[in-house]
């Protein structure tokens, strides 16, 4: 799960990557609807930083990471609304 991966790598992330990590951990429901470009604009980081962040966590790229976030949100919605 993405939160565990973030926790494992957090201490070794750079400043901008920590901003991404914090946002994804705290605001993952919002992030589930954002592509990498939108995320980079919101956090005022370079789009390549978003891609490198996802790769640092072991994903092929941001799309793979955001799919995992979307799956979590889907599961939460199923649990809440049956």
Image (cartoon, rainbow, N blue to C red):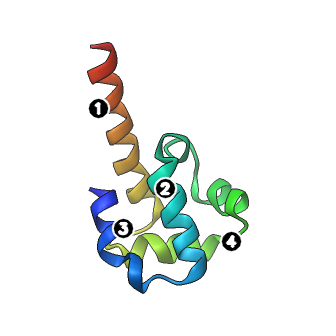
Q: CA distance from mark 2 to mark 4?
A: 14 Å
Q: Which residue is mark 2?
A: 24
Residue at coordinates 64% horizontally, 70% vertically from top-left? Answer: 47
* Image spot of residue 42 (x, y percent): 70, 56
Q: Is residue 16 above or below residue 40?
A: below
In the picture provided, is 35 more to the left or to the right than 40? Answer: left
* Image spot of residue 45 (x, y percent): 68, 71
Q: CA distance from mark 2 to mark 3?
A: 9 Å
Question: Which of pointers 4 and 3 indicates the residue nearer the eye?
Answer: 3
Dot placed on the residue nearer the N-terminal end, 1 or 3: 3
Residue at coordinates 43% horizontally, 67% vertically from top-left? Answer: 61
Helix, strand or loop at mark 2? helix
Dot placed on the residue nearer the N-terminal end, 2 or 1: 2
- Decide: marks 2, 3 in contact (CB < 8 A)? yes
Q: Which residue is mark 3?
A: 6
Residue at coordinates 32% horizontally, 19% vertically from top-left? Answer: 80
Residue 75's mark? Answer: 1
Q: CA distance from mark 2 to mark 1?
A: 17 Å
């Amino acid at each position: 799960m993405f939160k565990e991966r973030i926790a494992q790598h957090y201490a070794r992330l750079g400043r901008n990557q920590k901003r991404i990590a914090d946002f994804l951990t705290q605001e993952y429901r919002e992030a589930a609807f954002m592509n990498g470009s939108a995320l980079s604009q919101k956090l005022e980081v370079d789009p390549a930083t978003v891609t490198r962040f996802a790769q640092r966590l072991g994903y092929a790229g941001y799309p793979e990471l955001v799919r995992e976030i979307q799956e979590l949100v889907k599961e939460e919605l199923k649990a809440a609304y049956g």
